[in-house]
Image (tube, grey):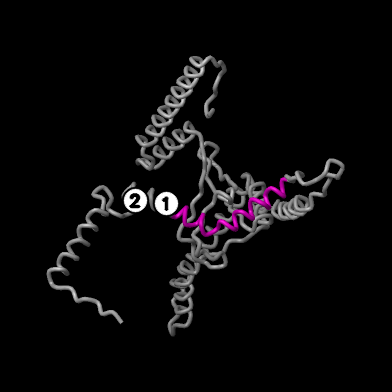
Amino acid sequence: MVKKKKRTEEETRRFKDTLKANAAKVEDSDNDGTLEDKKYLIKYIIDCKKEAERATKGLRDKQRELWLLYQNKENWDKKKKWQSKVFIPKIFMAVERATSLVKRAILQTSKLFTMEQMDEKTAPLNSQLRELRMAESVDEEAIDTVQKKLDLLKEQLTEDERRFKKELKHSNFVSGYGEMTKSSFLLGLGDLKRLWDDNKKKLRYENIDVLNLYISPDYMPFEDENPDYLIEYKEMKLAYLRKMAEATNKEAGSEVFDMEEVENIKSDFQKAEKQEEQRIESIQQSLQEGGYSGVLGKGSL
């Protein structure tokens, strides 16, 4: 057994000073470690995405394999020329049949659901009404007042339900939900995003590619609590990003998107394009000097 040598006070002090110095090096003066800090927020989102990607790697590999089978993409490399390459797309047929049944069931949006009043609004009024009726001296005027409030809430709920179902009927809910169920049947996961189309002034539903969806690994779908994070990875053209950023900032009345950062993306892209063109010109010049001729495109060599 080896006994640890006890530190002297001087050694302990030097050890603590070293820890403080290292901590000071780690702390970035531009990063306060809160979600209000842009650099910290970007790093936090990227770390969450990587965490979810690592935790679901095996699942995502299986989902990609199933997606290829659904698209009837087969590998015939191991087959001889004389062997048949005809097959029955059973997975495609089963998924499409199940999806069509769901689509048919939700065509009548008016019968899909009914709305109920939240208890936090009606419970106090019902309790008050019950107390008034059980009182020794019944106050009919007070009872009528409470009852009118309950009736008003019920009428408002009926109107909200009618209006929402009308919005659903004139939206792409049926097709969007159908595509979502297709993903659910095939991959075991589907996500439908509800959006508001400001130009057409109506609801719009968008099906999310679950292979580009990153959910907190400890999330349990059967629980009522929302996941710690849910990240959608989406590629878009720069022109569309700029248009979306300007429209969002205008609607919010504040700078939700940093337009300076958006323009930096453009300048960085143009710089990369210029460097690529210079690289190609340099290679072509070298080839010509060596007696070769030809035309190179972007990404060559």
In this view, the residue in front, 72 or 229, is 72
Q: Earlier in the sequence, mark 1 or mark 2?
A: 2
Element class at badge 1: helix
Asked if the residue under mark 2 is in contact with the one under mark 1, i.e. CB atoms within 8 Å, the reply is no
Q: Characterize the local packing of mark 1: few (<14), some (14-19) or many (20 or more) Cα atoms within 10 angstroms.
A: some
Q: Main secondary structure of the magenta part?
A: helix
Type of the residue with mark 2:
Tyr
| In this picture, residue 86 sits left or right of residue 171 | right
Position of the N terminus by quadrant: bottom left
Q: Residue at x 15, y 67 (%)?
A: 13
Name the residue beneath numbered marker 2.
40
State the mark number for residue 45: 1
In this view, the residue in front, 137 or 124, is 124
| In this picture, residue 160 sits left or right of residue 74 | left
Q: Please identify the quarter of the rendering in which residue 248 is found.
A: top left
Element class at badge 2: helix
The correct choice, above or below, for 101 with respect to 204 in the image is below
First to last magenta residue range: 48-71
In 3D space, how far apart are the residues under numbered discs 1 and 2 (Cα atoms)?
9 Å
